[in-house]
Amino acid sequence: MTAFNHFSDVSGLKANVDKISLYVVGVSNELRTGPLTAMQFQLGELPFKYLGVPLSSRKLNISQCLPLVDKIIARVKCCTSKFLSYGGRLQLIKSVLFEMQTYWAQVFLLPKKILYLITSVCRNFLRIGSNEYSKKSLVAWDTMCHPRSAGGLNIIDFSLWNRAAIFKLLWAVAKEKQQLQMKWGHAFYIKGKDLSQMPSPKQESWVVKKVFDARKWWNTNLN
């Protein structure tokens, strides 16, 4: 707190104490009470949202990810979306709806149910201009995700892209070793072992496990 207050005096930036929470896990009540009393911060509880993304020490459940689906549905129901042509709806899916899930998908592996709901909303919106369920299906959605040269509309598959984004994190761990967070990962998890051969950490958070499990996707695709 002395360093924190010194930074405020030098920079002139004052933190709103009412909006600050202290998150403490894995310690006794006595050790937890000390920092709370000294800092005068309120005790926060997991899960919570940081920069719009829910953070949790456990695997995210469907209810925690539903706000993302609701946000996409709200964009589809926007009054201006009702007057879009087929080409306009296609462009909205590629440029707007896809980007809305990108931020979440680059942080952690989304539940399959959430990916299915997002795909269903986009599929129905493209076909009938609404998120309501429709049996109208001229072309399969998997075919629409193919490149135009293969007869598709070049729509990115949300599930495959989510896996690719997680694999990108694994790539960063393997190749960008000079970054501070990657140095920490190597010192704490890898410890000089061969990344391609070492087992996935068993006692760590599910996010870390999924990043290491991305190696299985790579090996499966190669075989």
Image (cartoon, grey):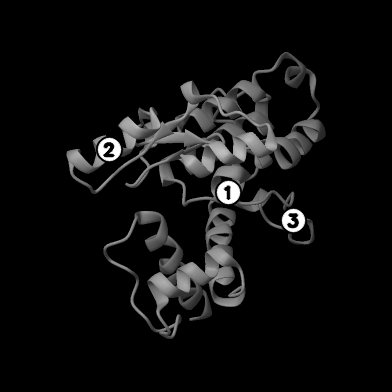
Q: CA distance from mark 2 to mark 3?
A: 64 Å
Which badge, 1 or 2, comes first in the chain's sequence? 2
Q: Amino acid at mark 2?
A: Gly
Q: Is residue 47 left or right of residue 135?
A: left
Q: Amino acid at mark 3?
A: Gly
Please give the residue where the numbered disc 3 appears in the rendered image: 151
Instruction: Report the front residue among 143 and 62.
Output: 62
Please give the residue where the numbered disc 2 appears in the rendered image: 34
Q: Crowding at label 2, few (<14), some or many (≥20) Cα neighbours within 10 Å?
A: few
Q: CA distance from mark 3 to mark 1?
A: 19 Å
Q: CA distance from mark 1 to mark 2?
A: 45 Å
Label 3 secondary element: loop
Q: Amino acid at mark 1?
A: Phe
Indicate the position of residue 79 as horizontal and vertical percent values.
72, 14
Please give the residue where the numbered disc 1 appears in the rendered image: 158
Q: Crowding at label 1, few (<14), some or many (≥20) Cα neighbours within 10 Å?
A: some
Indicate the position of residue 146 as horizontal and vertical percent values.
68, 56
Label 2 secondary element: helix
Above or below, 35 against 179 in this view is above
Indicate the position of residue 151 as horizontal and vertical percent values.
74, 56
Instruction: Report the front residue among 71 and 143.
Output: 71
Indicate the position of residue 152 as horizontal and vertical percent values.
72, 53
Q: Point out the frontmost of discs 1 and 2.
A: 2
Q: Is residue 147 left or right of residue 119?
A: right
Q: Residue at x 18, y 38 (%)?
A: 29
Above or below, 37 against 211 in this view is above
